[in-house]
Image: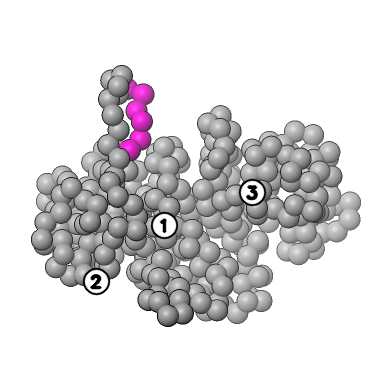
């Protein structure tokens, strides 16, 4: 059994006097110990909402969450708030997208790190401070004893991100969710952060759920990749098969939007036309159809189920880019 098994996860937001917004619509995937699984897609595809639902951080007044999310056999979506608080930070941790807004601006870094150690490991005083300094040192922050006394605005973007990672790994979590951990960082810092996450997976056997829009990140880190569009997985495969032969037009569009060093000088990129808001309901057909150059009338004939190639490469498309031999399939489980 996988460490985390998400099945038919749905998240909708109720709006007074307006139709509900479906941010996640029947999402299924698994993550196992020592495995890195990527959720990839544009902003607005439901990636961050998925992570917040798994962490129990969605506002309950207007968010309606359905499906199941079993962590080591326990459904996270059915836990009471106090039970979720016991798991959050200890067995399950999250690296948030924007470190400057995720860290408390009026509390020193040391207090924020030791708070986790006190809450989940019962450490206090000097032992907690020494452990916090050791955590900052492990994630590559120089002069950690001085940094413990500083405030978030006194740290660079890369240091703030490292501080968030130190807080996330303070209790050696079994599952780590990283929501765009390299956003707004320069490429050298990005590489260091990704190498740090990779070391955590290898050394501690941590299961890592990587949420990103950057296919360059998943190419060097993820074992399996789930491409999301409008809250559903439209393509799921291991890293190499996905990059070697992308099947869904959306995956092809994402890859075509990335500049390549080996491309001829002056060759234009191939962006995906329109925006993520240009879609239709999944019950009426393929949500990507209004932006797709390969759509046919068959794409608008109701629910489209997952299909798969003989190699296990799965996709949700009636007119795939590559003419693979396909057979009926079910919702992806990885």
In screen coordinates, is 120 left or right of 26?
Answer: right
Instruction: Identify which residue is drawn at 30% across, 33% down.
Output: 269
188 and 12: which is toward the camera? 12
User: Which residue is disc 3 drawn over?
Assistant: 99
Q: Secondary structure at mark 3?
A: helix
| Numbered tag placed on residue 44 in the rendering | 1
Is residue 70 within the magenta segment? no
Residue at 64% in and 48% down:
99
> In screen coordinates, is 199 left or right of 30?
right
- Residue 283's disc is 2
Q: Quarter of the image for the N terminus: give it.
A: bottom left
How far, Cα to Cα, is label 1 from label 3? Answer: 20 Å
**Which residue, as the protein is rendered here, is positioned at the far front?**
17
Residue stretch rendered in magenta on the structure: 257-262
Mark 2 and 3 residues: CB-CB less than 8 Å, in contact?
no
- Up the image or down, 122 lies above or below 164; here it is below
Give the mark, 1 or 3, whose residue is nearer the N terminus.
Answer: 1
Q: Earlier in the sequence, mark 2 or mark 3?
A: 3
Secondary structure under tag 2 reads helix
Q: Is residue 144 left or right of residue 204?
A: right
Give the Cα distance between marks 2 and 1.
Answer: 19 Å
Mark 1 vs mark 3: in front: 1
Q: Position of residue 202 (x, y in %)?
A: 54, 44
Q: Residues within 10 Å of mark 2 (few under 14, many from 20)?
A: few
């Amino acid at each position: 059994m996988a460490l985390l098994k998400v099945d038919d996860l749905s998240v909708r937001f109720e709006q007074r006097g307006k139709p509900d917004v479906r941010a996640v619509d029947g999402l299924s995937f698994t993550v196992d110990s020592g495995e890195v699984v990527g959720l990839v897609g544009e902003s607005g595809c439901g990636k961050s909402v998925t992570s917040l639902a798994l962490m129990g951080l969605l506002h309950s007044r207007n968010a309606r969450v359905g499906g199941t999310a079993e962590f080591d056999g326990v459904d996270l979506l059915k836990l009471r708030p106090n039970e979720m608080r016991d798991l959050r930070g200890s067995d399950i941790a999250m690296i948030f997208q924007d470190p400057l807004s995720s860290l408390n601006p009026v509390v020193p870094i040391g207090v924020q790190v030791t708070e986790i150690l006190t809450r989940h490991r019962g450490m206090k005083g000097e032992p907690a401070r020494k452990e916090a300094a050791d955590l900052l040192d492990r994630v590559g922050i120089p002069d950690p004893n001085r940094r413990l006394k500083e405030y978030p605005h006194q740290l660079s973007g890369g240091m703030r991100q490292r501080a968030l990672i130190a807080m996330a790994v303070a209790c050696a979590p079994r599952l780590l969710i990283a929501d765009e951990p390299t956003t707004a960082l320069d490429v050298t810092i990005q590489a260091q952060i990704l190498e740090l996450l990779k070391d955590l997976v290898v050394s501690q056997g941590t299961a890592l759920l990587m949420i990103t829009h950057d296919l360059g990140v998943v190419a060097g880190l993820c074992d399996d990749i789930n491409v999301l569009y409008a809250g559903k997985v439209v393509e799921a495969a291991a890293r190499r098969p996905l990059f070697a032969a992308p099947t869904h037009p959306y995956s092809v569009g994402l890859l075509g939007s990335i500049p390549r060093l080996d491309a001829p000088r002056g060759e234009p990129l191939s962006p995906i036309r329109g925006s993520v808001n240009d879609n239709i309901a999944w019950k009426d057909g393929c949500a990507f159809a209004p932006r797709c150059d390969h759509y046919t009338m068959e794409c608008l004939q109701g629910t489209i189920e997952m299909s798969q190639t003989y190699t296990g490469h799965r996709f949700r498309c009636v007119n795939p880019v590559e003419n693979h031999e396909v057979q009926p399939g079910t919702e992806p489980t990885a």
